[in-house]
Image: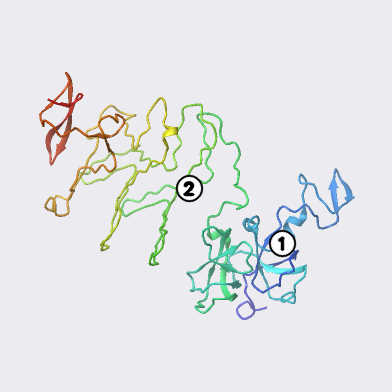
Amino acid sequence: MDNLTCGNPRAHAIRVYFENSGSATIYEGMPLCYNWDTTTNWFGGSVSDGAVTASTTTLEATANESRYIRVELPDAGNIHAFAGVVKKGGWCGKSDARVVDIYVPNGAIVPVRAGVATTVGRTVLSVISSVQYLGHALSGSAARPVAVAMATNAALSTAGLVLAKLDDNMFLYQTNQAATLYSGVGATAASASQCLNIIDVESAHTGGFFSNFIVKSTLSGALAAAGGGASIIGYINQSGNITTGCYVRPILGQLNLGGGTINSGSAQLCGVMAQLSGAATITACSHVAALWCDSQIGDASEPTAGELSMARFSNNGDATLTQFLHFYGNTAITPGKGGVKFFMSLDICQAAADELNACVIGGGTGDTTITTGATWKKIRIEIDGTQYWLIACSDPAES
């Protein structure tokens, strides 16, 4: 048979059994998922120690062939076990349990049943819980991206056929929706570690830019309702007890200057950089910040020993630091005309003088002459290359 004129040479179909417990109508291109946790077997018997026992149930600890034969409609507990989409055949239009052929997600372009408008090569299509077509994965719904549309159909508002590249491996997906995946107890020794996903690549480039991993998001819609977006969210739910010294960090950025010679006055090296850019016209906004630290720990969680800080700076590896903080403004702009206007801004940090735990305490409105205790400190800073001092007084009071 000539593949150039007859059929798709890459599309691969397999025969499975659609349980169809809800008597749903079978459609061409409809997504199906494996019944991966069924205990009902297919051959009507189970094997133990070489002996065959007639039974319709297979124990969990033994192999159950039905888990790769029986399929069902997508739901929150099975979309991680996506099987494929229904192939055209005599089963389409029926509404009973029966054998059907499905295209497996191997990267071939096949007809799928979609329920959203599509753009060729751009629209991501997802299998969605309790839905008999592929669509958009919306927040709050159990869904898994499995395809990219390979035809444009702007009028597709109700479910219909469209060509799509069916390949769930194009998307990173590690959850079964019904329960969190479990990677085991992990490393127990202090010197060991466990990493679930590893990207370890070396680049010998001598110019240009190299990155091991890029996550780029474009928010092209006009935000008119509450919402927003994030390219990366680092989140750790520390639910276990902590009884030893440790580090729990949702995001860790570490630059290791492990070799070579650095000899360039224009080199910029940093462990983490938060950069705000763009040329948007801002007429009204609550906050615009390159870095925002937000602590939401309540008073009840304040430690009796140690510290609770908004930000902590340390110098663990070496006793020498040239600068503790370096604030750099655009020297080409006249101060007050686009430069740094405030050294810092403290909002809702001031309290009355008797609230000694406040960050800023009112000093009164009496005599402006300030007396201090026996000791005081001076803090070295640098402004435009010139050394200055901030004065820290011991228990200042009005004279």
Give the image quarter of residue 169: bottom right
Identity of the residue drawn at 53% across and 55% down: 172
Residue at 15% from the left image edge and 37% from the top image edge: 382
Asked which quadrant contains residue 42, the reply is bottom right
**Alpha carbon distance from label 1 to label 2:** 34 Å
Instruction: Report x, y in % for residue 343.
Output: 20, 43
**Which of pointers 1 and 2 lies earlier in the amino acid sequence?**
1
Left/right of residue 157 with respect to residue 345 in the rendered view: right
Where 267 falls versus 6 (above or below)? above
Numbered badge on residue 199: 2
**Residue 294 percent across, percent down from the top left:** 37, 43
Q: Quadrant of residue 87?
A: bottom right
User: x and y percent of residue 271 in the render?
Assistant: 34, 42
Instruction: Please provide percent x and percent y for residue 282.
Output: 26, 61
* Residue labelled with disc 1: 71
Residue count near mark 2 (Cα–Cα under 10 Å), binned few <14, some 14–19, many ≥20: few
* Amino acid on which disc 1 is placed: Val
Up/down of 235 relative to 20, above or below = above
Using residue 235 as the reference point, say whether residue 347 is left or right of it. Answer: left
Q: Residue at x 61, y 64 (%)?
A: 106
Secondary structure beneath disc 1? strand
